[in-house]
Structure formats: C-alpha cells, structure tokens
Image (spheres, rainbow, N blue to C red):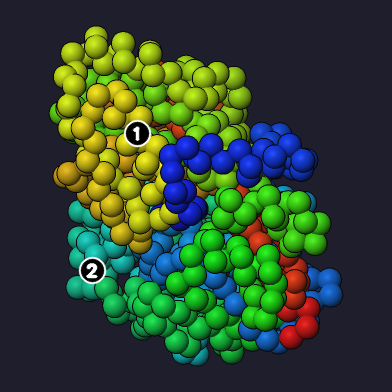
Amino acid sequence: MKPLRSRSVRVIVAAAAVGSLALTGCSNNDGNTKDESKSKKDAAAQSKPVTYGDAAASTGPAAEVPGAKPGGFINVYMESDMSHLDPGQIYVSDAGQFSNLIHRGLTNWKEDKDGNLTVVGDLATDAGKMSDGGKTWTYTLKDGIKDANGNAITSADIRHTIERLYAKFIFDGPTYIQSWLSGDDYRKALPDGPYTGKSLPDTVLATPDAKTVVFKFQTPQGDLPQALAMPGYSIVPKAADTKEKYDKSPVSLGPYKIAEYKSGKSIKLVKNTNWDPKTDSVRKQYPDGFNFTLTVDQGSQTKRLIADQGEAKNAIQFTDSVEPTQIKDVISNAGVKARAVMGFQPYVWQMTFNLDSQVMKDKKVREAITRAIPGKRMIAADGGTYGGELAGGLMGPTLPGYDPNYDPYDKVKKPNGDLAAAKKLLEEAGVKKGTKLTYAYATAPRSQKQMVIIKEVLGNLGFDVQAKEIERSTFYEQIGKVKNPYDLYMTGWGQDWPSASTVITPVYDGTKVQDGGSNYSHINDPQVNEGIKKALALPPTEAATEWEKVHHRIVEEILPAGPVYYAKQIQLSGSNIGGLRYSTEASYIDINNLFLKNP
C-alpha cells in the first residue's frame, strides 16, 4: 500500500535553513520532556496474526461505543484533495481512509479495543468459505444491502466490480485478485472490462444466483479475505457505473454519501439513509456527517487543534500528522497529549532508483547514495522519534518475521550517513564530477524539506542535482510511468495485510513492470521473480523463510531502493471528539467509531 502521496504521505513544514534540519528540539524534546514515541516492540504488537470471522462476527450492528451520542458534523482537515474516489483506483492511504465512510466490499477489517484484527464479512455473510484446498472461495451476500440510490446489491454487482478492474481506465489500484484469477497479463482476459457485454467465464468467476459469488483460482489463495478487504475491491454498483467519471461522483454503500464535492477545496458527507446498521458489524453512523476542508496545511492543522477553539473542537486530522516543529507543544501539554494518537505505520521510506536510468545501472552508484543519505536528518524532517525510526532493510517492523538486526549498509549503525564510503564507491564506479541526476519529489512540505537534504548530500558527492517537483496528488501516478524521466525518487510502501507477499510482490516483482504499477525501480531479476513464485505457493509459515531469502537478494545483491526509515504517526483531534483511538489497521485515527461529545 502506498502511503498518502507518501501512498499514503505525511508532510512537514520546510525549515528556513539547512542547519535547522536536525530538529533536535522536536525529536528529543530538549531533554525536558519524556520521549513517549512508539518503539519497535509496539510495532511487533501491531503484527499480530489475523483471524477470519464467521457469520456471528460478521453480523451487525457494530458494538456501541461507550458514551457515544448521535448528531453534529465532524470537521476534517486535509492538505489536499483525495487521490481517487473510484474504488478501483484507490491504493493510497488518504482515499483508503475515506473509503471506509462511503464504500463497502465483500469483507472488511474488524478491530477490537486492543487492536486485534479479524476479517469479517461486510456485504458477505462471513469472511468466505474455502474449498478445494484454497483454490475456490464462496461468498453469500447479506440480505438488505442497498446503495445510496436504493438499488439492491446482487451478485451481478460483485461480478461487475471485479470485471471492471480489467478495463484500461483502471490503472492505479491493487491487482492481486485480477492476477490470481487471470494471470499477470490479466487485462488480455477481458480487455474492455464488462462494457462490451463480455464476462469472465464461470470457471473463473461464477455467480450462480443473485446472492452467491464463487472465485476459482488455479493455485490456492488463502489470503483472499484480506485482499477483498482492501478499499480497492469495494463494490461499484453496475447500474451506477459511469466509468472514468465515477472517480468524481461515486455512489455510496457505506454509512455516508457525498452531498457536495468541490474538487481541491472541500467535500461534504451526509448520512446515507439506505445504509442499514443491521448489515454492518464494523461501522457506526453517529455524526450527521463530515465536512472535509482540503486546503489546510499541516502546520495550520496542528496550530488549530492545539488551540482547540471554535470549529477546531469538532475537528480531526485525517491522514496528515502533527507538524514536526510543534510536536513538543503536543507532548509537553497533558491536555493536548490526551487528544493525540500515536503508532507505527506500515510504511518503509526508501530512496528508489530508476534502474532504466543510465547513471543508476551501476550498483556501486546505488550503494554510494544509499550509504550517504543521513537517515537521522531525514527522520528529523518528519517529526524525529515521533515520526520515524532508522531502517536497515525494505521490510518494516509491523511485518511478521521482521529482523531488527538486519542492516547490510550500516544505515542504523551510521545514522548520519557515510560520505567517505560513498565517495570511494563512486570513485570505483568511475563516476565523473558534475554527472547530472534528476530527483523527483512531491509538492508536500515533508518532501520539500527532505529534498533540501538529498540535494545537499548528492551535491557533496559531486552530482549535479536537478530537483523536479511533482504535484502531490499525482506523484505516484507520474513516477509510476515506466518511461518516466527521473533518476531517483523517495517512495513509501507498506503491507496491504500482514504478509511479506504484499510488499515484495507488488514492488519488486519484475513481471509487474507496467504503467500504473508499483514496481517504481523497474527491477526485473529472474532469481527474485522465481523466489516470489516459490514463496507464493507455500503456506504462510513455510513461506516466511523464502520471503527472507528474496528480501536479502533484493537488498544486498540488487539494491533497487535504499532503506531510509520506518514511518510512525502522531495525530491530533479537538476536545469535543469522542471515540478517539489509533487504528492498527489504518495506521491513522480510527474513523469508524468517532462521535461528538456535545453534538
């Protein structure tokens, strides 16, 4: 999963001078405030095994939140617009968080008060019934499911949703299920989607009656319930589908619907009166709606919420974080800190190298840059110890099997980087001083601040750095083009569910180098590809060893991206917000249980 433009990107305010980038007052709290940021032990707690829920766990209504009251509008602060609203295009965390308010899928994540996760049936009666050793999965739809227009949802809508993902205009969402059903070249199986009257054969996807959906795979797919819980597989009603236009005006199945959307400015959600709480074991509908303001920068969000005046009392941060220079103001004030949530995110920030770039073809060059990047300064630009932790590899601490001692390029041992080692490697590679490098970054304060660091470091190595800014909402779309003109770029990626398969497969599988794909480095190594195939064919317990082997080859032998840091999160809400908690699944404020204490 991409972080928010970090495919999911958290942002920060640029400092006036390079010297301020250490941000010691925020990351270390001047030594006067106890560091209560989350540790890797907390991250390990977020990687607990997932369970699959039965019909009882999937039956609504969702449990009542203690003290909850109905009524009022919650104000939501965001820096910019959503990346997408069409479920098929959703693969970035802002839209994923938003999706849970308006979209529904066959399954969903149910989280208890301790952060334990269960996959339950959302539109389906349970997490799915497996047969044929995991090759066949059967889902039965619940009674009483309607979209916001009042139309009943049937198996035809589920079929339509899956088949439209094969169409060419869907380019930015997950591809797991399509690939599992029809292979890596899945689009060839239904190049126009369902729009010319063609369908996938019943031997692949069957809908024998209005309430039943059967997925039939060539190989066992034990993770299907978790994949179906992704926002990218939420249902698009057949009668409501407007193809490309759906991205701006989707029809809701969730507890809220879009009443007004001013692109780039605001979104107003109101209650979807056709949503039936009896069918939903996850979501509530306490507020009358949500008012999203899409133009509030991170610094202003933080200031407003710390001050807690007027409309800010009813407000939350959505996917942005506390602005780094104001973290001390949050954690040193007990009243403000009580309105904060913290936790590890699944994202690993990495310097990604475009392997099609002539300069980046030499591994010594890639290793030199990896060793030179000062992870500590990069983290300081994202909130210090409350924003991240040094990364030694490309698999994060929220993944099962994470190795905290893995550090082949001394990224943890040498947090300020190693310019001497980097220069030696470049000398061995024969890189001439003044060699041009084009570095792409997003129009977000965090990205802008880190660009200053990157440009300085690469300049010290003798490169002539051309920094190219890309509009934040289209950053991943632009670097996701195979023939993009950039040499390197910072990217963030996190697990789609607790499995290395959801990190290594989409990002490092050479068979997935394509426009709109997530293999941003364009790595295509036969040994890695074969290792991925082998790991995917094994049960999770046996696959762990194989994933570790693949990870080691990627990092040590190829190095398509240099590890920088593991992301953490700290967010604020206003004092009138009830039901506040951190979601281990979303890695943000849990949007499902919020209410206003005094509506």
Q: Is residue 436 visible?
A: yes
Image spot of residue 352 (x, y percent): 34, 36
Q: Mark on residue 456? A: 1
Image spot of residue 480 (x, y percent): 27, 49
Q: Residue at x 38, y 67 (%)?
A: 84
Residue closest to the eye, 503 or 8: 8
Using the numbered discs, state the Cα–Cα distance from disc 1 to disc 2 in whole angstroms.
Answer: 55 Å
Q: Is residue 47 above or below residue 336?
A: above
Residue type at numbered disc 1: Glu
Q: Residue at x 69, y 42 (%)?
A: 29
Of tags 1 and 2, the one toward the viewer is 1
Q: Mark on residue 198? A: 2
Q: Tag 2 or tag 1, which sits nearer the N-term?
A: 2
Q: Residue at x 38, y 64 (%)?
A: 83
Name the quadrant containing residue 110. Answer: bottom right
Residue closest to the eye, 144 or 77: 77
Q: How many marks?
A: 2
Q: Are marks 1 and 2 in contact (CB under 8 Å)?
A: no
Q: Residue at x 54, y 61 (%)?
A: 299
Q: Residues within 10 Å of mark 1 (few under 14, many from 20)?
A: some
Q: Residues within 10 Å of mark 2 (few under 14, many from 20)?
A: few
Q: Is residue 301 above or below residue 265?
A: above
Position of the C terminus by quadrant: bottom right
Image spot of residue 157 (x, y percent): 41, 74
